[in-house]
Image (cartoon, rainbow, N blue to C red):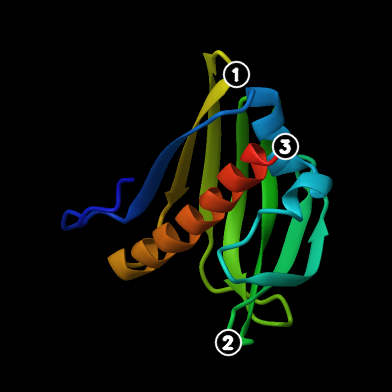
Amino acid sequence: MNASATKPGTRPELTIKRTFEAPRELVYACWTEEDHMKHWFFPKGFTVPHAENDIREGGRYRSCLRAPDGTDNWVGGVYKELTPPERIVFTHAWQDEAGNAEHETVVTITLKDLGGGKTQLTFHQAFFLSDASRDGHAMGWNETLDGLELYLAAR
């Protein structure tokens, strides 16, 4: 994970690398097919009482992530690029319940086939308004990727 202090004059970014014991096609499907996503695509302890996904280039998504304390957190964005089975690019913005957002980041998922049924995932998100925001996202995305690892291991 790269969540080090940001140099003055730069905007914070987040990079996470993970290796999964699963073929690249399956890891890609886990990011792009709702039948997979509903099992892992949220941080630990969260539930998803509402989710809508139009998984195609130009398609929109919007979800409500309910925190363990009952707080609802709305997030949405647009799929910018889907290149099976190697790359996914989408925008990410926290929203109010009506769908209004103040700041948008871009998430890029790159999948590399390592052979032997292993896949290296590189997660990149840019740009954040602060190091604190980047660090909070790092925690949430790492918990989410932990869920993906558990989901893949159970298959």
Is 84 or 37 nearer to us in this picture? 37
Which structural element holds mark 3? Answer: loop
Q: For this view, does 139 lie left or right of residue 148?
A: left
Of residues 134 and 98, the one drawn nearer to the viewer in this rendering: 134
**Above or below — where is 105 with respect to 68?**
above
- SS for callout 2: loop
Q: Residue 28's spot in the image, x, y percent?
A: 68, 33
* Residue 115, position as x, y percentages in the image: 54, 12
Residue found farthest to the front: 154
x then y, percent, for residue 40? 67, 53
Kindly identify which residue carries mark 2: 69
Residue at the extreme bottom of the image, as rendered: 70
What is the quadrant of the C terminus in the image? top right
The answer, for residue 115, to whether it is visible in the render is yes
Measured Cα–Cα span from mark 3 to mark 1: 13 Å
Q: Are marks 1 and 2 in contact (CB under 8 Å)?
A: no
Q: Earlier in the sequence, mark 1 or mark 2?
A: 2
Which residue is situated farthest in the left direction here?
Answer: 8
Q: Residue at x 60, y 41 (%)?
A: 89
Which kind of residue does numbered mark 1 sit on?
A: Gly
**Location of residue 86 by image quarter:** top right
Label 2: how many residues lie within 10 Å, few (<14), some (14-19) or many (20+)? few
Q: Is residue 9 left or right of residue 60?
A: left
* Position of the N terminus by quadrant: top left
**Dot label at residue 117:** 1
**Which label sits on residue 155?**
3
Instruction: List x then y, in percent, for residue 7.
Output: 17, 54
